[in-house]
């Protein structure tokens, strides 16, 4: 099949990561359909390619709607999910509903239309409290406390991986799972730590230097700039192996306190840090082992300074 004839469906394609994947697929010459209910998605992210994409508004929990758009599709990239930490705590039932009904519908629909290629977005949240840092893809996945609503998100991702592997063996030729680790970049909305810090820093001035961060500030994360994420995703399209799982992230660790101070410095602001309690279930340290994606050829191009500067310029 020639490239031009290959048809992709991207669920969650108007979201932050999804819209960037759509730009990549158009650049590579594929035909794409986007399926999103736009609860967090925004068609503006696709304005420069709007004539080349087909957008269908719909909910992955609705089998009728989803089955219809899967007709004649060759490859599905499944990203639609309730993202944003505050929703894990406030809407765990909705998170699980989208995870369970949505994933069942994706698998049933692909089987129905004999679609043989599926890429599934999982998350670093499947590791929770990993035994090893940096954490490789063989780490056991956990739900540390069934009563904590936060784990609705990670639990949903674990279920989708479990289904992915076993449905993958039986029904697919290429089923790939990827675990993004804190992707950031322009136009991602202000609910993620980096754009949220940048946005709050606008209100800091000589009289008001108080800058509140969640937790002690010692919590450690690693971040990947969206262009680097897309580079890794393109490698998965070209070289990713059936039934394999890939971390996508960087090993550039930083504490949340150092991150706040770094962004303040890049914005030429002086801040006085104040702390609040860390939300229960938020992990102290997270950093992926990126050896597997590097073996496919991944090279980090953006460090935190250059990535954050790109967002600041874009603001
Ligand atoms: N951004 C990150 O750092 C990160 C980290 C780990 C995992 N992920 C995963 O990557 C994927 C994309 O994340 P993102 O950052 O672009 O999030 P996002 O919220 O920007 O995108 C998710 C999209 O899914 C759509 N959606 C939600 N529920 C839906 C439903 N029921 N039916 C149809 N569409 C629905 C939303 O409208 C949104 O456009 C998600 O699966 C997310 O869990 C992202």
Image (tube, rainbow, N blue to C red):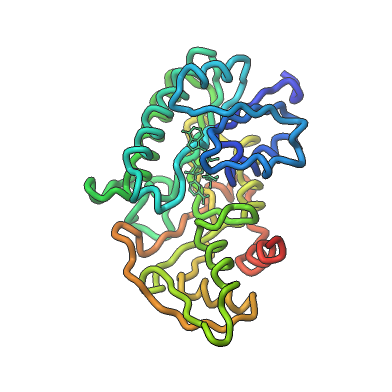
Give me the residue at 67% from left, 37% from top: 22
Give me the residue at 41% from left, 73% from top: 217
Q: Quadrant of the C terminus?
A: bottom right
Q: Position of residue 108 (x, y in %)?
A: 44, 18
Q: Position of residue 215 (x, y in %)?
A: 36, 70
- Horizontal side of 252 relative to 218 (left or right) equals right
| Image: 265 above or below 91 | below
Give me the residue at 55% from left, 37% from top: 38
Q: Position of residue 233 (x, y in %)?
A: 61, 42
Residue 92 falls in which quadrant of the image? Answer: top left
Residue 33 falls in which quadrant of the image? Answer: top right
| Image: 215 above or below 163 | below
**Along the line of sight, the residue nearer the viewer: 153 or 276:** 276
Give me the residue at 58% from left, 82% from top: 205
Q: Quadrant of the N terminus?
A: top right
- Horizontal side of 224 relative to 164 (left or right) equals right
Residue 220 falls in which quadrant of the image? Answer: bottom left
């Amino acid at each position: 099949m020639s490239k031009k004839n290959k048809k992709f469906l991207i669920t969650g394609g108007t979201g932050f990561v999804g819209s960037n994947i759509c730009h990549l697929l158009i650049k590579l010459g594929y035909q794409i359909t986007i399926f999103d209910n736009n609860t967090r998605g925004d068609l503006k992210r696709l304005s420069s390619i709007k004539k080349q994409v087909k957008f269908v508004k719909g909910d992955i929990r609705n089998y009728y709607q989803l089955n219809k758009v899967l007709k004649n599709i060759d490859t599905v990239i499944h990203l639609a999910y309730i993202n944003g930490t505050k929703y894990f705590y406030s809407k765990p039932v909705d998170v699980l509903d989208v995870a369970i009904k949505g994933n069942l519908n994706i698998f049933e629909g692909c089987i129905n239309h004999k679609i043989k290629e599926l890429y599934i977005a999982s998350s670093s949240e499947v590791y929770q409290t990993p035994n090893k840092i940096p954490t490789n893809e063989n780490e056991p996945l956990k739900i540390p406390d069934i009563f904590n609503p936060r784990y609705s998100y990670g639990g949903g991702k674990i279920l989708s991986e479990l289904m992915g592997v076993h449905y993958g063996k039986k029904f697919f030729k290429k089923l790939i799972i990827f675990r993004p680790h804190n992707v950031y970049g322009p136009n991602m909305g202000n609910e993620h730590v980096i754009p949220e810090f940048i946005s709050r820093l606008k209100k800091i001035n000589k009289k008001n230097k108080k800058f509140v961060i969640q937790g002690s500030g010692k919590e450690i994360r690693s971040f990947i700039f969206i262009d680097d994420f897309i580079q890794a995703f393109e490698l998965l399209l070209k070289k990713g192996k059936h039934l394999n799982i890939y971390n996508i992230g960087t090993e550039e660790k930083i504490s949340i306190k150092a991150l706040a101070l770094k962004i303040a410095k890049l914005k030429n602001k002086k801040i006085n840090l104040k702390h609040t309690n860390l939300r229960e279930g938020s992990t102290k340290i997270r950093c992926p082992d990126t050896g597997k994606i590097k073996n496919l050829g991944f090279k980090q191009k953006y460090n935190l300074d250059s990535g954050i500067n790109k967002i600041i310029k874009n603001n």
